[in-house]
Amino acid sequence: MATRAHNFFAGPAVLPLSVVEAARDAAYDFAGLGMSIMEISHRSKEFDAVVQKAQADVLELMGLSAEDYAVLFLGGGASTQFAMLPMNFLHRKAEYINTGEWATKAIKEAKMMGETVVVASSEDANFNYIPGNLVFSGDADYVHFTSNNTIYGTEFKGTPDTGDVPLVCDMSSDIFSRELDFSRYSMIYAGAQKNLGPAGVTLVVVKKSWIEEKAKTDIPTMLKYKTHVAKESMFNTPPVFPIFVVGKTLEWIKSEGGLAVMQERNEKKAALLYDMFDNLSDFYKGAVAKKEDRSLMNVTFRLPSEELEAKFIAEAKTLNMYGLKGHRSVGGCRASIYNACPVESVEALAKFMETFYAAHK
Ligand SMILES: *Cc1c(COP(=O)(O)O)cnc(C)c1O
């Protein structure tokens, strides 16, 4: 194999090497069966064990119980959840916080299903901050927010307090990156391809009592949470291979020491880059307005000109660093430093930022 690249892609993104190796092995021969994981029945006892272990590991990492929460592995990406959530739970009114493009897309889907109120937004400054002083009506069916804004590099540092109103979060780009009180959420969802595994599966963790009491039943079978909860995520053929890889990533997180260790590492990695903006501020400008809103996962920044940004990204490639181009809607540069991004990669990038600065300041 070629040397592992320094991978800063925003998604699909870097996976732990041991997970990639396990995926390679299982793609050829799974559990000594003489068949690939892709060639066996999703109803086989071997695959059943994979799903059950992954569900148990999700709950363990979140500190939740199988009595209270269901763990689903669904298709359609996080984007399908934008529609499925209001389709199942919007009866009268839903409240949303708009912190970027993904939140905007979630709001668009909810509006098709019923009254949707945007209670706070940072659109006035192209989403470069997290709105404060959140006020909720207290009588919505649910409140939805996006914990980490992949494109802009902003992140909620705490959990909004919605009282008794069910709280739902799109955690696609920061799930399992830090410790959180997951019991405050009625539903959490995340497309796997940022911090969990390959594209093709979406993790949904939902409170069973909320499903029982409030989820609609007069909607299409596959788009009904009740269907998937009742069948423990095995109503139809699930995304078998992506689930296997997610399971391996969960095992990796646990073996490394869990969410406390992930958080400690992620804070250390992020600081290496944010320190550059603070120390070399005449050249590198962080794209996030307030320091306290800076993401641990997606570090967004600008250089003095677009020409220098293009040169920076091109030169980084010659040093085996990939994925540093900012999202097309905001431009600039972005280093995505998810759980599986080794500290060595971030150190290499920080060093390159220093040498590039010295050559072009
Ligand atoms: C990438 C991303 C999405 C979209 O996920 P898909 O699985 O491609 O639908 C949604 N929300 C956030 C926060 C993301 O980063």
Image (cartoon, rainbow, N blue to C red):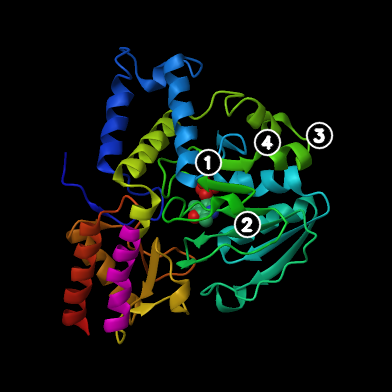
- Looking at numbered disc 1 in the image, what kind of residue is underneath it? Leu
Q: Position of residue 52 (x, y in %)?
A: 48, 27
Query: Residue at (47%, 63%) from the top-left corner?
Result: 151
Q: Secondary structure at mark 4?
A: helix
124 sits left or right of 339 in the view:
right
Which of 60/343 is in front?
Answer: 60
Q: Which residue is mark 1?
A: 203
- Looking at numbered disc 2 in the image, what kind of residue is underneath it? Lys
164 sits left or right of 128 in the view:
right
Q: Secondary structure at mark 1?
A: strand
Answer whether residue 328 is visible to the viewer in this image: yes
220 sits left or right of 17 in the view:
right
Q: Which badge, 1 or 3, comes first in the chain's sequence?
A: 1
Q: Which badge, 3 or 4, comes first in the chain's sequence?
A: 3
Q: Is residue 277 magenta?
A: yes
Q: Which residue is mark 3?
A: 218
Answer whether residue 338 is visible to the viewer in this image: no
Q: Residue furthest bottom?
A: 282
